[in-house]
Amino acid sequence: MHGRMIRLRIGHVQAAASCQQDVLRIQRPRLSPKAMCKRMRPAMKKTRRRLDYSHVILASGFTVLFFSSGTRMAFGLVLKPMSEDLDLSRSALTSAFTIFMVVSALTMPIVGRLIDTYSIRVIIAIGTVVGAAAIALMGQINAAWQLYVLYGLVFAVGHAASSVAPVSVLMSRWFPERRGLAASAAISGNGIGQLVIIVLMASFLDSLGWRTSYAILGAVNAVVVLPVALTVIRSHPPISPTTAVIASDEPMAPDTSLPLREALKSREFMLLVALYAACGAQDFFIATHIVAFAQDQGISQFLAGNILAFMGLLGLTGVLISGAMSDKMGAARPTVLCFLLRIGLFAYIPIFQDTASITVFALLYGFTFTMTAPLTVVFVSNIFGTSKLGTISGLINMVHQVAGGLGAALGAVIFDWRGSYDTAFVIMLVLAVMGTVAVIALRERPLEYRLAPEGSV
């Protein structure tokens, strides 16, 4: 009896399975491999486009910074012909660049706040239009006040809206798991743009003149960068099931609800301000005075200029290594490496100032030159979250640039007073030590989880 019941159950199961197979055959007819591939091809192409568009965003960020940096650095190239044509002293012309640095720095926190509220695409597009118009009109100036307004004010605002700050935030949104490396790759456009645009502009400067060169440069910015900003850049990646699964499976930087006022009063923000102030003062001091320092020690103008160019090339290597390290081990370790290298360099250069020593110093410093640039968004995301990323990173970028202007001015004052840069090098050594201490004391963990409510045990 028991055996008969087992056989009946097996028969029922087999009949049910056979029926289910028949239903499946009716609902899903068999397809040849070729037909299946043809049917799946549209979905595969759509998925591939979605996955690859992040690389398009990366290329667009690189393009924006390529032209932004090259356009900004063209001022030094046309300084002498502008001075002769306008009959203005170099100090009067350089004042326009000082105004540019101050206005651009003060605009960065405003741009950061706008990025947190509105579309990055719109902000970059507006900045491109403003900056391109100011550069194109540079060829029409005939007085110092016009230079101060166009370059010092208008171009500064446009540059702040289409520079490292918005591009870094854009990269952090599209590459949440690799924001350091992505920001580094985009920021490498700074060095490459500076090299390419300056070389091309220098080759045509004698035949075209500085006025026509600026008009062409402004037009190229409008023709190339503006379409990229309007048609290619997307402020946020699309939300898809795949993205949701990845976000749920792997930890990401928190979206903190910490009020902005509390974040700005925190110990971590003050330490970030200290280390980026030290970094900015060192960077602009070296960028402004390294060629003059080399020439003071008997190095030819040709070799000194090439040293500066190769500093930029080594900076590309440093920024990519820094970004890759930050994705694997956080932003603090590459920052410590940067400051430790600078401690050794600034302790070395006051003692050894022959041609070989200056060359080694400059090239190794060039390696560290932009190491901390992509780390701003990594620090801010890891500590404060991403909801106020634009505002906080904009404030830190402002501090970096203001300190840079002070560092460049300090070097000039010390040289006029002492007749050498040795005292300035010692001050930069102290700043490197200060930066190292600040980053070691920094806790690169979400701030909101370490703040306990009042009265809690």
Image: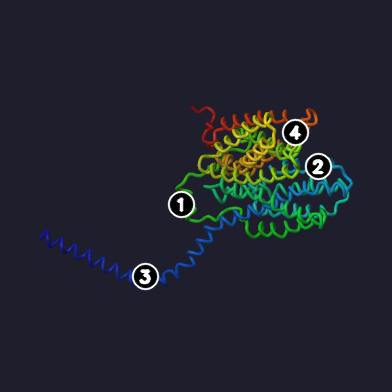
Q: Determine which residue is flagged by label 4.
A: 411
Q: CA distance from mark 1 to mark 3?
A: 28 Å
Q: CA distance from mark 2 to mark 1?
A: 53 Å
Vertical placement of residue 119 versus 418, above or below: below
**Residue 138 point in image, percent of width and height:** 81, 52
**Residue 1 point in image, percent of width and height:** 10, 60
Give the residue type at disc 2. Answer: Thr
Q: CA distance from mark 4 to mark 1?
A: 53 Å
Q: Determine which residue is flagged by label 1.
A: 245
The residue shown at (72%, 34%) is 407
Mark 4 nearby-residue class (10 Å; few <14, some 14–19, many ≥20) = many
Foreground mark, 4 or 3, reads 4
**Residue 190 point in image, percent of width and height:** 66, 48
Mark 3 nearby-residue class (10 Å; few <14, some 14–19, many ≥20) = few
At mark 4, the secondary structure is: helix
The residue shown at (49%, 67%) is 42
